[in-house]
Amino acid sequence: MSEVHVLTTGEAARYCGVNFRTVIRWIERGQLKAYKLPGRGDHRICVEDFVGFLRDNSMPVPTELAAASRKVLLATASPALIEGRHILQQAGCEVEIASDSFSAGAMLACGKPAMLVLDTNLEGVNGMQILDTIRSRGEFSGVSVLLVAPTEDSDQQRWLDAGADAVVDASCDGSELAGRIKLLLDA
């Protein structure tokens, strides 16, 4: 079975049970992100963007497309957190690891993950600035953020107020981290 990365407006319309012209109107109004092909100007919709659109509008996500949105970016250098990668892969997630803030930014922009796991202990990271950037830019609106806070951080509510979807302690084990990630991805 080949993995679908883009959809036509007709395919998106069939998933939603609407006419393809409705999908084109969503695109023209900026509600659904798409790009135009050169020549005739037909639209193509990235599966990740389509799944995000469905979730934002409380529409059911087809099972064959839901699997495509299980990409997780781990921004960490912690061996304990990297160890959780195998548990996530066994759960059907595609996992990428960035060991510095520059790589994380590039992978976030290009890779279009469904979730960012941000370790605030990562060198060169200001978690508040990163959360602010992610939440202020439209292209990252569908990205869930799980923040790994330092063990001595007693005020985890401030991270939630800043835009994190969930916060875990840096001392958590790999299975707890994987469980929290799966819970957020399935929400």
Image: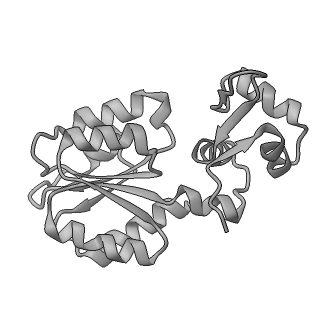
| 91 left or right of 178 in image | right
Query: Residue 130 location, x and y as percent?
Result: 27, 36
Q: Which residue lies furthest to the front in this view?
A: 39
| 101 left or right of 86 in image | left
Which residue is located at x 91 percent, y 38 percent?
Answer: 19
Query: Residue 70 location, x and y as percent?
Result: 50, 60
**Quadrant in the picture for the N terminus:** bottom right
Which residue is located at x 43 percent, y 28 percent?
Answer: 137
- Which image quarter: residue 175? bottom left
Which residue is located at x 51 percent, y 43 percent?
Answer: 142
Which residue is located at x 20 percent, y 41 percent?
Answer: 101
Q: Which residue lies furthest to the right in this view?
A: 19
Quick check: 131 above or below 180?
A: above
Query: Residue 4 location, x and y as percent?
Result: 65, 55
Residue 173 or 6: which is nearer the viewer? 6
* Figure disc tally: 0
**Quadrant in the picture for the C terminus:** bottom right
Quick check: 164 above or below 102?
A: below
Query: Residue 145 location, x and y as percent?
Result: 37, 49
Residue 33 or 141: which is nearer the viewer? 33
- Which image quarter: residue 65? bottom right
| 81 left or right of 134 in image | left
